[in-house]
Image (cartoon, grey):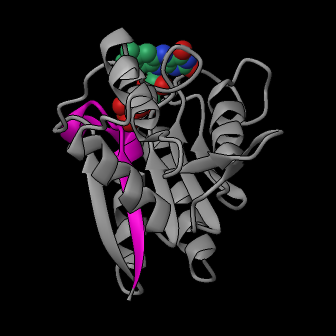
Amino acid sequence: MKSLVYIDACMRGKESRTRRIAEPIIDKLSERYEIIKYDLNQLPLTIVQEDLIQKRTHGDYDSMSLSWAETIRDADRIVIAAPFWDMSYPAALKNFLELCSIFDVTFKSNDKTCYGNCRAEKLLYITTRGMDIATGDPLEQATPHLKALSWLWGIGPMDVIATQNMDYVSLDEIEEKVQNAIKEGLKLVKEW
Ligand SMILES: Cc1cc2nc3c(=O)[nH]c(=O)nc-3n(C[C@H](O)[C@H](O)[C@H](O)COP(=O)(O)O)c2cc1C
């Protein structure tokens, strides 16, 4: 069975609308992929600081982040669920991605530039935004970074399932947006 890495960066437990959208989509995908889930609330994420960079420079990688990076490298698909925070995504996700961005694992380089070393041909990013800000709006700085990083890691095109204006509408409208996003996601992953 092919494998799928699911990075859950939803930080509000059962309250998370982003997670509510992601879960049925992941359930559907579990019919065709072995799901390897990283719940960022549960992982001991150390910040990438001088000490860690020094160690890595001398080839000393901690086994935990190395195994995350290798799992991402070898996955056939990647799904990221993360709410829109501070015009981008939660720092825990950036932290996790930095820990997994390991030379000769998720990317390599030649004498001119870096290039990707991951197998996944597709990445799905699922998000919900409080304000009425659309994917691709200059104020929306999550997708540009995730697209750039997936280029660095050699991961194929990124699909986005997003809802917006979640914090300024009625509960019924929120529910409608969640259900529509689930429908859109389930339709997308039929061929994914
Ligand atoms: C810490 C924090 C930062 C947020 N920053 C933004 C923001 O910059 N722009 C925005 O539109 N919404 C922002 N929001 C609102 C969330 O994007 C919105 O409520 C979203 O639906 C939350 O997703 P969740 O239900 O999965 O946690 C923020 C919410 C939190 C808790």
Q: Where residue 30 appears, x then y in whole percent?
A: 35, 78
In-image side of 49 versus 184 (left or right): left
Above or below 82: residue 176 = below
Q: Kindly indicate the quadrant of the structure image that contains residue 118.
A: bottom right
Above or below 8: residue 132 = above
Q: Check if residue 10 falls in the magenta segment.
A: yes
Q: Which residues are magenta?
A: 2-19
Locate ligand 1 by image quadrant: top left
Query: How many numbered markers are drawn?
Result: 0
Q: Residue at x 60, y 58 (%)?
A: 117
- Nearer to me, 142 or 103: 103
Please identify the residue farthest to the right as the structure is shown. Answer: 112
> In which quadrant will I find the C terminus?
bottom right
Please identify the residue farthest to the top as the structure is shown. Answer: 50
Q: Check if residue 111 falls in the magenta segment.
A: no
> In which quadrant will I find the N terminus?
bottom left
Q: Where residue 158 appears, x then y in whole percent?
A: 68, 55
Q: Where residue 152 appears, x then y in whole percent?
A: 68, 44
In-image side of 172 versus 67 (left or right): right
In-image side of 89 versus 39 (left or right): right
Q: Residue at x 20, y 37 (%)?
A: 13
Q: Residue at x 45, y 68 (%)?
A: 75
Q: Where residue 110 appears, x then y in whole percent?
A: 75, 46
- Nearer to me, 59 or 133: 59
Q: Residue at x 42, y 69 (%)?
A: 4
Above or below 119: residue 92 = above
